[in-house]
Image (spheres, rainbow, N blue to C red):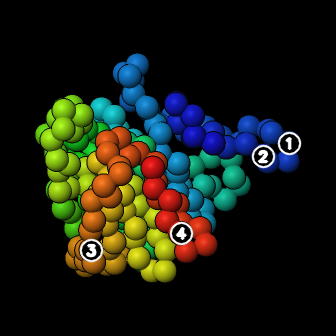
Amino acid sequence: VVTRQGLVSLDPQTGEHRFSFWFRARQDSSVTAMTPIVDGDRILLSSAYFKSGSVLLRVNPDGKGVTEVWRSLALEMHWTRPVLTAGHVFGFSGRDEPDARLRAVEFATGKIAWDRPEGWPNGGHAKLAAGEAAPNVFGRGSAILADGKLIALGEAGLLGLFKPNPAKVEELGRWQVPQLRYPCWAAPVLANRLLYLR
C-alpha cells in the first residue's frame, strides 16, 4: 500500500504489518500519488515533489523489510504511472507543466536511456481556458501498453502512439483530440478494441 507517507506492507490474510518505508518530502504540500510498479521482489516508488525522485526497493527474503537498490531524480512522477517493458520504464516525468519530460529509464539501474522535453509554459492551462490552441506537446501525460505499443495521452488532449524502444524515441503518430482539453489526467483505457479518453 502507498500512503502519503510512503510504502506499507501488510499480510493480505491477517492484516499484520510487515514493514514500512518512508517516502515523502517533508513539506506539507507534498504528495506521493503514483501507483508503485512491482516486478518480482522489486518495487518502484516515485514522486515529483521537492526532489523526492524515485527509489527502487528489493523486498528482503523474509518479507519483513526492503533494501534500496537505487535512488535517483531520473524519474519524478507526479500522478501517472510509468510503463515497465523491455527492462525499462517509459513515462512522463515532472511536477509542473514547464518541467515535463518523456523518458526511458533502465529499471535495474535508474539510468536515463533517453529523454525528450515535453514541457509547456507555466499557467498554460489558463491560456487554454482563454481560447488559445493547445500546445503540440504532451506535458505531464500518461501512457498504457497495448499490442507492443505505448498509447499516450497528454494533459491537454494530445493522443500519441509510441514504440517502447530503449535505444531511442520512436513516435509513430499523434493527434489532438478535439473534444479534450486540460486537464486530461486520467490514463487512457483500452477495452474491446475501443479507446476511452477523458
Disc 4 residue type (three-letter)? Leu
Residue at 26% over, 55% down: 138
Question: Label 4: which residue?
Answer: 194
Instruction: Kindly report the distance in space between the C-alpha atoms of the residues bearing marks 2 and 1.
Output: 6 Å
Instruction: Kindly report the distance in space between the C-alpha atoms of the residues bearing marks 3 and 1.
Output: 48 Å
Residue at 37% over, 62% down: 152
Question: Label 2: which residue?
Answer: 11
Mark 4 and mark 1 in contact (Cβ < 8 Å)?
no
Mark 1 and mark 2 in contact (Cβ < 8 Å)?
yes
- Please name whichever residue, 126 or 57, is drawn nearer the observer in this view of the structure: 126
- Tell me which corner region of the image, top left, top right, bottom left or bottom right, holds residue 175: bottom left
Instruction: Kindly report the distance in space between the C-alpha atoms of the residues bearing marks 2 and 3.
Output: 44 Å
Q: Is residue 140 above or below residue 85?
A: above
Disc 3 residue type (three-letter)? Gly
Can you tell which mark lies on residue 173?
A: 3
Labels 3 and 1: the sequence-earlier one:
1
Query: Does residue 89 appear to the left or right of 121 in the view shown?
Result: right
Q: Secondary structure at mark 2?
A: loop
- Please name whichever residue, 184 or 93, is drawn nearer the observer in this view of the structure: 184
Q: Is residue 44 above or below residue 112?
A: above
Question: Label 1: which residue?
Answer: 14
Q: Secondary structure at mark 3?
A: strand
Labels 1 and 4: the sequence-earlier one:
1
Q: Is residue 89 visible?
A: no
Disc 2 residue type (three-letter)? Asp
- Tell me which corner region of the image, top left, top right, bottom left or bottom right, holds residue 39: bottom right
Closer to the eye: label 1 or 4:
4
Disc 1 residue type (three-letter)? Thr
Instruction: Kindly report the distance in space between the C-alpha atoms of the residues bearing marks 3 and 4.
Output: 18 Å
Labels 3 and 4: the sequence-earlier one:
3
